[in-house]
Amino acid sequence: MPNAHLLDQSWGADLPRLRSDADVAALEAIPYAERIGPQSTYAALQAGAAFQPDAPAIQFLPQVSAEAEPAVITHAQFIARVTQTANMFHDLGVGPNDVVSFLLPLLPQSFYTLFGAQAVGIANPVNPLLAPHQLAEILLAANTQVLVTLGPVPGSDIWDKVMQIRDQLPQLKAILVVQGASDEAQSIYNFDERMAGCPSDALRSPRQIRSSDVAGYFHTGGTTGTPKLVRHTHGNQVYQAWALRLTMPIEPGRPVLFGLPLFHVGGALTQGLAVLANGGNLVVLGPAGWRDPAAVQNVWRLVERYQPALWGGVPTVLAAALSVPVGQADVSSLRVASGGGSAIPVAVCKVYAEQFKVPVLEVYGMTETSSVHVMSYPDRPIRLGSVGHALPYSRVRVVKVDAQGQWSGDCAPQEIGVIAMSGPGVFSGYMSETHNAGAFVEPGWVNSGDLGRLDEDGYLWITGRAKDLIIRGGHNIDPLAIEEVFFQHPAVALAAVVGQPDAYAGELPVAYVQLKPQAQVDSGALLDFVRQRTPERAAVPVRLTFIDSMPLTGVGKIFKPTLRQDAAERMVRDLLADLATEGAAITVTVAAHAVHGQAIRVTLPASAQAAHPTLETQIHARLDPLVMPHEVAWL
């Protein structure tokens, strides 16, 4: 049997059991640098391929079905394709400081591109669902030299977006197109044809990669202004693969159902690199992954066919899967469920524990920590609602910060403060120095922007996103606590609580709920259910809105800015409803604002201005007491 974990040169066949702080301390007695062999993601993938070269690395399902036969790529074939892709980039002039960006759905070529780019230069995976101007901003900020993209295929607008923005990218040397034709006069090359002509046995680049070399730029943050590009080193990313082998059932030959996008660290590193570098295999759920409704609808039959030990995804996917009947599917292979990206409702965790007899290992991290930094350990008691302890060699603190975002003291146990993290996975800063102000509370300690507390046993509890807190008359309301109550109701599939502007209280909590298929419940009855289970009267939502489909990000998180915008628009329309008269229709929008972050815009027909001379004054009088700024326009 080969070494049980080739990323760790000091271990034998057995991995340590981490049951206590003492076990972790014993592991950490050996300096982390002495434990790691590979200095790059490419070397880590080579280590993973060495376990069982002929075993699957990727099983790709073009259509998501338990009956479909996957296209199988072995570990030997996978590392060969990554090598060919790296050599293709090298031939196009990509060096250690050059950037290869890609706009691709989940295809085998997406994985070759991610890791091939890192072997010779810097990879920049980008969300292809973004608008053209957002894509241009990210590619400009990254100084993209080579772009890999999907061709003009039915059902996709990626190619059209690329054609719209290519002239805005002065550094762009070449476009490699997957499922598209070459046009060498336009520096456009077919990906597969060009790759096939490159050697697969060794890298042409003479580069000797160090762990401190930059491996990737991952975009994060908002969609306005200069994009935030997180700078990952090879060492940051390899740590993720090394640490998760300790705490997850990621094993040689073991499959994982894979549906997370590669532009997110959860897909690229937590499930992608970690599984491949440890000899496992990814069952890729079609080009759209978990965004394809068939992926969730077939989830338990997919578990039966592929027999994964780990069932992981973002909380919305975990919750949606519970609406799918298990039927006669054999799901006995499952040993743990895991999720992160946002809080997993305790009610969801309880169902998995009761119905499937598996623990839910909640994870916590961010792009700036190369994904998972804190998690519930499988060999330690799990406290539902907590995200557990920091990974080995990593640290987490809850701190007080001053107005400049700098450390002003540590919080006592059970005291809520800002979560700060340090360790081998923590990045050194954003690509642009303008974003680094306030990014660290102290050198090496990243400011998460999240609020939390540590209990007396070192378990971390997330109490909310600093910007998601609802402040009602000076009283802080944690939306997570209210959302947990909604999830206790059997009809609720998804729930989100956000703040609605209010002239008196500043903000009031309002709720948005997506019901399970065929479920029915009256809004009043559901609010009564929540009211009876919410100790804080001020935290009970003042309004409940049922929606057919919760707005989600590209990785399946609930996108609260859309809900906050909707809540503000509804409130303003209600506030101004009696002012609308014949010929003076009032249109209300809430949108991003360059100075204020968000602003209310009230639009009136210019033709009615003479007939309603006091209307604008009345609108200002009603909206002036709101904290959110507003403007009135006659159009």
Image (tube, helix red, strand yellow):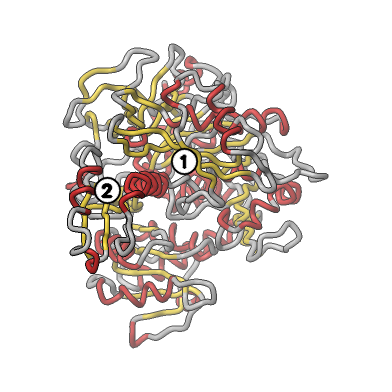
- For image coordinates 23% across by 18% down, the residue present is 409
Tell which of 626 and 282 is nearer to you.
Answer: 626
Tell which of 80 and 477 is nearer to you.
Answer: 477
- For image coordinates 36% across by 36% down, the residue present is 468
* Gap between marks 1 and 2 measured at Cα: 24 Å
Name, please, the residue furthest toward the right: 328
| Callout count | 2
Q: Where does label 2 land, which residue?
A: 598
Indicate the quadrant containing the N terminus: top left, top right, bottom left or bottom right.
top right
Residue 377 location (% of width, % of height): 54, 26
Q: Residues within 10 Å of mark 2 (few under 14, many from 20)?
A: some
Residue 316 location (% of width, % of height): 55, 43
Q: Which label is found at residue 341?
A: 1
Quarter of the image holding residue 491?
top right
Tell which of 187 and 529 is nearer to you.
Answer: 529
* Left or right side of 10 for 409: left
Name, please, the residue furthest toward the bottom: 185
SS category of the residue bearing label 2: strand
Tell which of 298 and 520 is nearer to you.
Answer: 520
The residue under label 2 is which amino acid type? Gln
Residue 53 location (% of width, % of height): 61, 54
Q: Residues within 10 Å of mark 1 (few under 14, many from 20)?
A: many
Up/down of 612 relative to 444, above or below: below
- For image coordinates 53% across by 34% down, the residue present is 344
* Left or right side of 253 for 387: left
SS category of the residue bearing label 1: loop
Residue 241 location (% of width, % of height): 48, 41
Up/down of 189 relative to 272, above or below: below
Up/down of 183 relative to 478, above or below: below
